[in-house]
Image: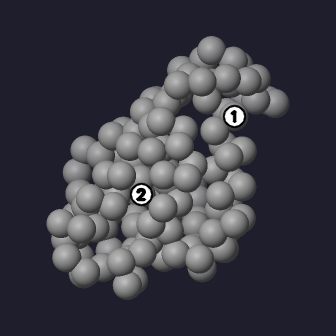
Amino acid sequence: MKEKRMKRIIEEYISAYNKFDVDGMIRNIDEDIEFKNITNGEVNAQLNGKDIFKKQLEQSNALFKKREMNITEQVINGDTVENEINFKGVFAIDVPDGPKSGELLKLKSKSVFKFKKGRIVSIEDIN
């Protein structure tokens, strides 16, 4: 797959993410998408399948009243794209034993997208 197309798909995904547009986020997602969230080297969330991934995206939309993800660096290796990410978001709800509504979260992370036949087949968010 051409690098330019992979970059465009990721840009569209992040733009949709920032707009809370779930349908835009899943537009280029494969039916068998694998999603992992990894924190401190441990997988703390893992999902398989477009429908389950969509439900997770809809649920996570409720956590923030504002959010913004920006790519600060991007490395492409074949069909894999590693993105260094800056994230900031304002919580919309009180999280049990966590942040309260209105609190600001800022973090740096990495998102790794893998492609096959022009579709995103894997996303790993690494904190």
Residue 71, position as x, y percentages in the image: 29, 46
Gap in angstroms between the C-alphas marked 1 and 2: 21 Å
Rendered position, 36 above or below 93? below
Residue 26, position as x, y percentages in the image: 53, 60
Estimate how packed mark 1 is, as few (under 14), some (14 to 19) or many (20 or more) residues with alpha carbons within 10 Å.
few
Q: Which residue is pictured at 58% across the width and 67% down the height?
A: 35
Q: Quadrant of residue 107?
A: top left
The amino acid pointed to by label 1 is: Ala
Look at mark 2 in the image and give the residue it sits on: 111
Rendered position, 18 above or below 103? below
Observer able to see residue 127 = yes
Rendered position, 50 above or below 11? below
Residue 116, position as x, y percentages in the image: 39, 83
Q: Is residue 120 left or right of residue 60?
A: left
Residue 92, position as x, y percentages in the image: 67, 23
Q: Quadrant of the N terminus?
A: bottom left
Q: Earlier in the sequence, mark 1 or mark 2?
A: 1
Residue that extends furthest to the right in the rendered view of this protein: 96
Q: Are marks 1 and 2 in contact (CB under 8 Å)?
A: no
Look at mark 1 in the image and give the residue it sits on: 62
Estimate how packed mark 2 is, as few (under 14), some (14 to 19) or many (20 or more) residues with alpha carbons within 10 Å.
some
The amino acid pointed to by label 2 is: Ser
Q: Which residue is pictured at 40% across the width and 47% down the height?
A: 14
